Amino acid sequence: MTMDSDALYRQLVQNITDYAIYMLDPEGTILSWNEGARYFKGYCAEEILGQNFSCFYTPEERSSGLPMQGLAAARQNGRHEAEGWRLRKDGSVFWASVVIDAMYDNGQLIGFAKITRDVTEKRAQQQQVLKARDDAERQSRELSGLYAFLNTVIHNIPTRVMVEDQSDSRLLLCNHSIQQHRTGPETLLTHISTDALLTRIRGERPREDNRAAGHFRFKMETPEGTCRLKCLILDIMDNGHATGQRLYLVDDITEEYTAQATIRHMAHHDALTNLPNRLLFGERARALLENFEPDIGRVGMLLLDLDNFKNINDVLGHQVGDDLLCQLSARLHQHLHHGETLARIGGDEFALLVPEAHDDNALSQLAHTLAISARAPFQLSEHRVQTGISLGGVRASNDIDSFEQLMRCADLALYEAKRQGKGRYETFRPELAELARERLDLENDLRNALAQQELFLLYQPIYDISGVRTTGFEALMRWRHPVRGIVSPLEFIPIAENSGLILEIGAWALVEACHEACHWPDEQRISVNLSPAQFRRQALVDEVTRALAITGITPSRLELEITESILLDASQHNIDILHQLKQLGVRIVLDDFGTGYSSLHYLRSFPFDRLKIDQSFIREMCDSREALAIVRAVTGMGKSLEMEVTAEGVERPEQMALLQQEGCSHLQGFLLGRPGPAADIVCGPTNALESTSSRVPN
């Protein structure tokens, strides 16, 4: 039996299971349903025939009109193809590939043939392919960007980067060379060719083996100067295995090397004189002492102190003072020829390390040579200055074998040189340490002296020019030590000033002297010496005010004696204090006149009531024309400025006669009266020459 063609076609369509094939009328109603449709959708024909095909779409797609848009497209174009998610009966979805064909009969639309295929798996594979492609493209872009970034960095950093194939020494990479134009920073390394650099690296590299040698440093000469280089060599590895390629990283560290050398120099040298400082001086001394052998040669040390440097610095200015220190260091260097180290260890303090000081005489000769050299005048700008140095020396021994001991002993010797009058050299002796201990003991005893009433005042008379009438007395401090007896002020006053005790002692002396003067006739004055240390604090004006208030003495009867060193120390500040004291009504006396640096300047700056000619001029005036000329000049200047002039240190009648002839207004000295206790004071007219003959010296 032969099946007609229509029946055969329908049977073929109905039995296809790979495609869902169904017929729609022009409004989208399902007219037929094949086995493939049932398989894909899960509906049997009875459940779906007569339904609108939009039931296979999601609610969102139905509300948007998407199903009917597909039919409209097929009606207009004859065919519509699309993909999208479709619903099964159980609510699950699958990705469908849809073809809708419009069917016509005699030019009239009679319906649509809709063919649907489940391509969910195919779509997933396509998505994976697309994702893999996107990932590959993204990685390619990232690698391309990274390569561009690294290429930019490598070709613009100052580090020379080179990669070499070890099998044939072929250069695989070099970020720059002298032939290439670079936009990065230019250094001396820029002017070194790659070939020359690699040749030098191979020659400089440590030769223990042929493996990467890590960091090492070397230098190369270029037309622009010496280039200091640092090289790092690394073997390139891949998963722990050597690739046979070697990486060279070369940096120019010339500036770093220079900077570090500068820092090291600054840390070990004085910024002004460029001499070694205390740190470097100590290092060199300790190095010498490590190999110290007393029988072969001894390490020697000198400490040098510039005399009167503070006065020069304050009067002429710090710039002149700095120039003086530089010229002195250069001058001293001219006499060093045997490996000595000259160092500046303080403001005006220098130290000299002598590697081989065979005996004390050799060290002494060197010290005297330096002292003579330092006494020659210095030309400092428009100023010509003559000064000197004091020196203290010591040699290492079995008992003095450390840097600290050498410094301490040399310092004790220097202290003794300055105590003996400056401009001298002293060699350390063991007794100097004992004297230092005695000074320390004396300082400790002095701290209790005031409380124990061991300090007392003596009074030396001041006469008018006739030598008959006393016009007042100068208060002089003394110390009656319970064990040592009477201690000279030359011994304990410097200790009091260095320790700061002079502030308390000076305040006590001011009140004590004013209190004693209250018992004298009104025309008698009392002179009290002020220490430079008292001028360093504003409280001095308050202390004088308090002394006047406590004792009730008339201010004009109090004379405050100062030396030029007070004026040289922070001069404007001290001038202001002098004016404040002057406003209290007290009198100001300039003591030791003529021994300082700026006497005339301060005579113009401040109206002193009295000048006291230093006793060194009085002592020599009868035998020295120069001393007499100075006395005559000071006396004449005092008259012109309407200041009283006192000659102190008058000890011989011929001095007194000459001073009377020159017109001094007042006299003071052993010839006229020695310092004595308050109980022995005779106020009023008396014959000084007769009275002093019977006075017991104190």
Image (cartoon, helix red, strand yellow):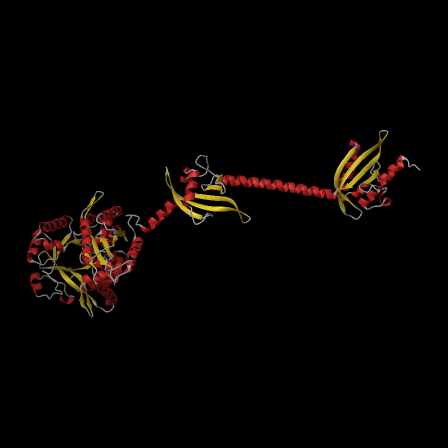
Q: Is residue 490 left or right of residue 281?
A: left
Quadrant position of the N terminus in the picture: top right
Q: Is residue 202 left or right of residue 335?
A: right
Residue at far bottom of view:
482
Is residue 506 in sight in this rendering? no
Which of the two residues, 22 or 314, is positioned nearer the viewer here?
22
Residue in the image at 15% along x and 67% along y: 679
Q: Is residue 419 left or right of residue 56?
A: left
Taking 656 as reference, is 260 above or below it?
above
Count all numbered tags in the image, as a single digit. Answer: 0
Quadrant position of the C terminus in the picture: bottom left
Taking 182 as reference, is 611 above or below it?
below
Which of the two residues, 538 or 342, is positioned nearer the viewer here?
342
Taking 231 as reference, is 393 above or below it?
below
Is residue 61 in sight in this rendering? yes
Residue at far top of view:
106
User: Residue 655 placed where, x, y %?
Assistant: 8, 55
User: Residue 129 placed where, x, y %?
Assistant: 67, 41
User: Residue 59 placed where, x, y %?
Assistant: 77, 44
